[in-house]
Amino acid sequence: MTIKLNELLDIQESIILMESGYQNNTYITKSLRFLYNTISELSRFNELVDAKIIMLEEMDRVYALGLYNPPTKQPAFWTLLTTVLDTEHQNTFNEFVHAIKKHIAEGGVSTLHIERSEFIEAMREYYSIKLVETLKNCPVNFEFVYNEPRVERLKIIINQLEQSYSLDLSGSVLEICCGNGMATAALSKLGIRPLCIDNDSYSILEGLVSKVLKPEKTIVADVTELTDIIKGEEFDASIGFMLGDIDEFNKPLWKEILIQTIKLTKKGGSLLFTFRTEPEVMFVKDLLEELATGDVICQSETESLYDCWIYIGKKKLV
């Protein structure tokens, strides 16, 4: 059961989101096809249909539709479709929803006014829970996820950067390439709850099962498409730990990831990225030179495999 979605819609039955993954909601081909076919089926009836739908609105625009599926051999459930991440198809989605509404008998249509941000958080939780259920038989190494020496070391590093470089992680924080949340565990200890994103489903699974990643604050998606995945939101700080490996072959990919990350960072917002090698951190410093002001720090603890080089900076105000 997806607690947040059920709470928002105030329903008891199970909910199934039409698109198979969170990122699929940025281009809702499957949902639009389903809505088109539904309208075609309803058009066959000469009378209004006795059915139940829920429309979710914000500022008089419908961004989600729930369709009730009555019990048969299986328990009743709701199918949920949304254009909350797909602005390109917002108008088409609205047209389809209102076309369906015209075929529903009086009393079968409910409208809820819910902020998109609340709905998006509930969506993230839904897909996180779905991932855990889908990969429930995969082994998880809890000791690897929670690396206490690294957690303690990162806590010290972050505290030092806050004092010496005005690092500010008190507001909204985006953590890119979070992996299994090994670094996120240190942030949690410091009371920081970032929105985490990574494209590795198994690593995200490890973090979710180990509870260092929070379901409603975690996304499995391609970070090179960050601005399509995270809509209408800017962050006070953007961070990433142990980014890389960065080499001549994948530099274009990392360039895209970092440029998209900067786009989602507020002007004057804090930037913190750590790396294994000096060439990697210098690549990032040079890349961001026109967009941010930053410094490179070399950690003297050479025995550590993690966070040996640090880029600390702020996005430029202009």
Image (cartoon, grey):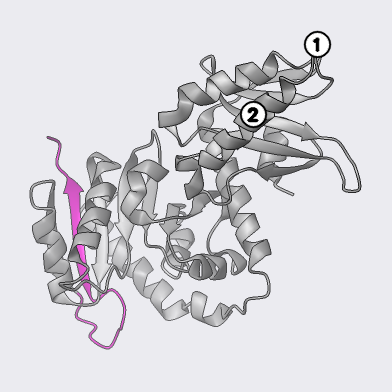
Furthest toward the front, the residue is: 44
Report the amino acid beneath label 2.
Leu
- In the picture of the structure, the residue carrying the numbered disc 2 is 65
Q: Nearer the viewer, residue 135 or 211?
A: 135
> Which structural element holds mark 1?
loop
Which residue lies at the image location 36% right of the left edge and 57% below the top edge? 176
Side of 98 relative to 236 (left or right): right
Q: CA distance from mark 2 to mark 1?
A: 17 Å
Q: Which residues are magenta?
A: 299-318
- State the image quarter where residue 318 is shown: top left
Asked which secondary structure carries label 2, the reply is: strand
Which mark is first along the chain, 1 or 2? 2
Q: Which residue is mark 1?
A: 106
Question: Mark 2 touching mark 1, by CB under 8 A?
Answer: no
Task: Tell me where residue 129 appears, x and y as whole percent.
Answer: 64, 56
Q: Is residue 3 above or below residue 37?
A: below
Instruction: Tell me if 194 is positioned left or right of 209 in this view.
Output: left
Image point (67%, 33%), residue name: 8
Is residue 293 on the magenta stretch? no
